[in-house]
């Protein structure tokens, strides 16, 4: 995957081959390289450099939240017949493997809950750390682990929003600055939406 090239005055072409993680140097016989090494309009490069922070800022603002659902929230959705509303309001909802297996085949009015459910990756050792530190049940700790991100993921990926019914867990999430919705709050916020695009409130 060559994606850049530079030609020196000595007629050597350096090709950046990102796919193979290498730089190739190729001598081109008979090549005449102009004496001017800088671009004809150097100010254009400065403009592009100034736009980079704006592009990064726009990317960060445009990221949509990553919704992670607890089984008690999905149970409430099923019991109240809100599967159609949930699948209309959200495109993806991340759950633990066990929760996915429990709810993936539930269908209401031709809307299959499994169509929006995604299995979130989690690490068992992080789960045990949550159990010890937060004093929560294993199922709650697995949920928290599904939203755990390292420093790079915090920059690149959307922030987590938990869908939970347990008041004590929601309060603890609020204390550490993480958003959460219970069933009633979620219905109030997203019940009137008609598309799969959501906005963070």
Image (spheres, rainbow, N blue to C red):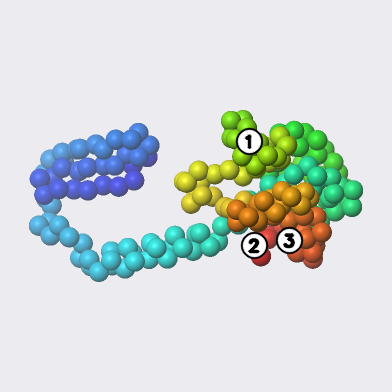
At label 1, counting other C-alpha atoms closer than 10 Å, the crowd grade (few under 14, some 14-19, many 20 or more) is few
Q: Secondary structure at mark 1?
A: helix
Task: Please name whichever residue, 49 or 172, is drawn nearer the observer in this view of the structure.
Answer: 172
Q: Secondary structure at mark 2?
A: loop
Identity of the residue drawn at 53% across and 62% down: 61
Quarter of the picture containing the N terminus is top left
At label 2, counting other C-alpha atoms closer than 10 Å, the crowd grade (few under 14, some 14-19, many 20 or more) is few
| Furthest-top residue in this view | 124
> Is 152 on the left-hand or right-hand side of 163?
left
Task: Please name whichever residue, 28 or 201, is drawn nearer the observer in this view of the structure.
Answer: 201
Q: Secondary structure at mark 3?
A: loop
> Is 22 on the left-hand or right-hand side of 12?
right
- Residue 75 position in % (x across, y down): 84, 45
The first of marks 2 and 3 along the sequence is 3
In the rendering, which numbered label is found on residue 27? none
Residue linked to disc 2: 200
Task: Please name whichever residue, 50 or 20, is drawn nearer the observer in this view of the structure.
Answer: 50
Separation of residues labelled 2 and 3 (CA atoms): 14 Å
Task: Please name whichever residue, 182 or 39, is drawn nearer the observer in this view of the structure.
Answer: 182
In the displayed structure, 44 sits above or below 105; it is below
Identity of the residue drawn at 74% across and 50% down: 168
The first of marks 1 and 2 along the sequence is 1
**Badge nearest the viewer, 2 or 3:** 2
Identity of the residue drawn at 25% across and 69% down: 43
**Badge nearest the viewer, 1 or 2:** 1
- Residue 66 position in % (x across, y down): 63, 51
In the rendering, which numbered label is found on residue 132? 1
In the displayed structure, 105 sits above or below 43; it is above
Residue linked to disc 3: 195
């Amino acid at each position: 995957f060559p994606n850049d090239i530079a030609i020196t005055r000595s007629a050597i072409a350096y090709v950046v081959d990102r796919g193979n993680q290498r730089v190739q140097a190729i001598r081109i016989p008979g090549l005449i390289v102009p004496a001017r090494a800088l671009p004809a309009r150097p100010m254009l490069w400065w403009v592009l450099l100034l736009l980079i922070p704006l592009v990064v800022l726009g990317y960060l603002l445009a990221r949509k939240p990553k919704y992670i659902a607890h089984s008690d929230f999905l149970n409430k959705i099923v019991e109240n017949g809100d599967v159609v509303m949930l699948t209309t309001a959200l495109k993806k909802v991340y759950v633990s493997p066990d929760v996915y297996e429990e709810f993936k085949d539930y269908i209401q009015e031709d809307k299959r809950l499994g169509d929006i459910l995604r299995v979130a990756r989690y690490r068992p050792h992080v789960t045990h750390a949550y159990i010890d530190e937060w004093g929560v049940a294993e199922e709650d700790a697995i949920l928290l682990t599904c939203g755990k991100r390292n420093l790079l993921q915090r920059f690149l990926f959307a922030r987590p929003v938990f869908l939970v019914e347990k008041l004590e867990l929601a309060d603890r999430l609020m204390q550490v600055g993480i958003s959460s919705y219970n069933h009633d709050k979620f219905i109030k916020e997203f019940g009137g939406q008609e598309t799969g695009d959501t906005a963070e409130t």
